[in-house]
Image (cartoon, grey):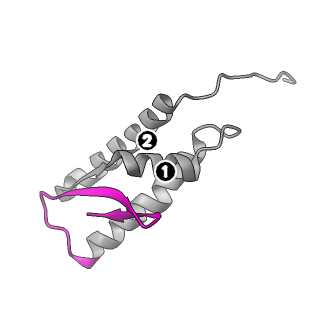
């Protein structure tokens, strides 16, 4: 096929929804550890600014969430500083993502 298919650019609501889906999938994986992850609006905007590229669509968002948010969570879990039943909130501080 030599045709080019053009898609409408994703809206901010679409992009935020994609991030929400990624976090929902993460929460399903965290459920066996009785943990939950939430993102503040500031964290979502930070991820959009850092990872969304209109040329590539939402693909970079997924990779960014995996490499950044999931890595931060894994380190926190391995430290043993998260108790079962906890909700971990991802926020921004001083230009980077932080866990609370």
Q: Quadrant of the N terminus?
A: top right
Which residue is disc 2 drawn over?
A: 19
Residue picked out by circle 1:
47
Q: Is residue 4 above or below residue 74?
A: above
The furthest residue to the right? 2
Q: Is residue 8 left or right of residue 77?
A: right
Label 2: element kind: helix
In which quarter of the view is residue 53 placed?
Answer: top right
Spatial CA span between label 1 and label 2: 8 Å
Q: Position of residue 64 (x, y in %)?
A: 52, 54
Counting the numbered discs, the total is: 2
| Residue at image point 67% right, 40% down | 56
Find residue 22 and report its horizontal and vertical position in percent: 41, 43
- What's the magenta region? 79-100
Is residue 83 part of the magenta span, yes or no? yes
Q: Earlier in the sequence, mark 1 or mark 2?
A: 2
- Residue 22 falls left or right of residue 53: left
Closer-to-camera residue (92/32): 92
Asked if the residues shown at circle 1 and circle 2 are in contact, with their CB atoms under 8 angstroms apart, the answer is yes
Measured as percent of width and height from the top left, residue 81 is found at 20, 74
Residue at 14 percent across and 67 percent down: it is 83
Membership of 38 in magenta stretch:
no
Q: Residues within 10 Å of mark 2 (few under 14, many from 20)?
A: many
Furthest-bottom residue in this view? 79
Q: Position of residue 98 (x, y in %)?
A: 36, 65
Q: Is 43 on the left or on the right of 7, as rendered? A: left
Which mark is nearer the camera, 1 or 2? 1
* Quarter placement of the C terminus: bottom left
């Amino acid at each position: 096929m030599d045709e080019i298919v053009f898609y409408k650019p994703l809206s901010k609501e679409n992009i935020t929804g994609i991030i929400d889906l990624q976090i929902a999938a993460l929460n399903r994986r965290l459920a066996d550890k009785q943990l939950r992850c939430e993102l503040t609006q500031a964290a979502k905007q930070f991820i959009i600014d850092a990872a969304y590229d209109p040329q590539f669509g939402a693909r970079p968002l997924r990779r960014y969430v995996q490499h950044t948010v999931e890595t931060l969570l894994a380190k926190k879990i391995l430290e043993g500083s998260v108790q079962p039943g906890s909700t971990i909130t991802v926020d921004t501080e001083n230009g980077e993502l932080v866990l609370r």
